[in-house]
Amino acid sequence: MRISQLAQQTDVPVATIKFYLRERLLHEGELTSPTQAQYDESHVRRLQLIRALLGPGGLSVATVRELLNHLDHPPESRHDLLGIAHHAVHRPVGDGLDLEPVHQLIVRWGWQIDEQDHDTPAALADALRGLEIAGFALPQTRLDRYAELMAEVAEVEIADLPIDSLEAAVRYVVLGTVLVEPVLLALRRLAQQDASARRFGAPPRTAD
């Protein structure tokens, strides 16, 4: 298909497609003349992926380019896929964090954590510091319970990791990390509403 047909099928403007091509997010089509190229279903799938990562995923163009490069050239170990995905959603945190309390928690929970991963423990340390600054006490028992529940979520997710195709595994881990985190947050808020309604009583519904 020509670029105009690709744009029509994916609902992505031609100008945007050309931008993705310039930014090396979308692979080139097959040249049929010096000024024209043909595109196929692989371009359709890649455009859908790009839109998901830039839109709901909220990632930058540079981060999406890096992720797509990993999709095209995946690491040999499926365990290393998590590092790629976690790096994509990592947000910078402040300096001077004391990571020792977090490492103690990790040891107490019995979690096997990549020693090269400093970003994720730092993110937890930064979040806990924010609670401390705000004067919001998070009981140790609740933090332990959160960890227990997150371990169950992780087990479900890792159990579904494709093992027959490394490309499929990369796609599953990257999209499952980047795009599912907002789903988990929304589910938590809905569950809080339900729990509150069950404990305190839901307000009466008003007619539209």
Image (cartoon, helix red, strand yellow):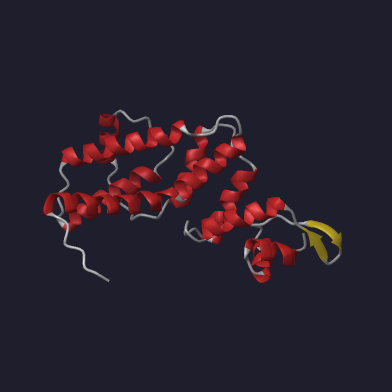
Q: Position of residue 10 (x, y in %)?
A: 64, 61
Q: Position of residue 103 (x, y in %)?
A: 29, 36
From this viewpoint, which residue is outermost toward the top? 110
From this viewpoint, which residue is outermost toward the right? 33
Q: Nearer the viewer, residue 54 or 201?
A: 201
Q: Nearer the viewer, residue 31 or 134?
A: 31
**Horizontal side of residue 155 vs 82, given as left or right:** left
Does any portion of residue 170 appear in the rendered image?
A: yes
- Measured along the vertical axis of the image, is residue 46 above or below residue 118? below
From this viewpoint, which residue is outermost toward the front? 207
Picture residue at 48% right of the left edge, 41% below the top: 83
**Horizontal side of residue 131 vs 54, given as left or right:** left
**Horizontal side of residue 36 vs 144, given as left or right:** right
Q: Position of residue 6 (x, y in %)?
A: 70, 62
Picture residue at 62% right of the left edge, 57% below the top: 47
Location of residue 37 (image quadrant)? bottom right
Q: Position of residue 121 (x, y in %)?
A: 34, 43
> In the rendered view of the protein, which quadrant contains the C terminus?
bottom left
Picture residue at 48% right of the left edge, 39% below the top: 82
Location of residue 118 (image quadrant)? top left
> In the rendered view of the protein, which quadrant contains the N terminus?
bottom right
Picture residue at 47% right of the left edge, 59% below the top: 58
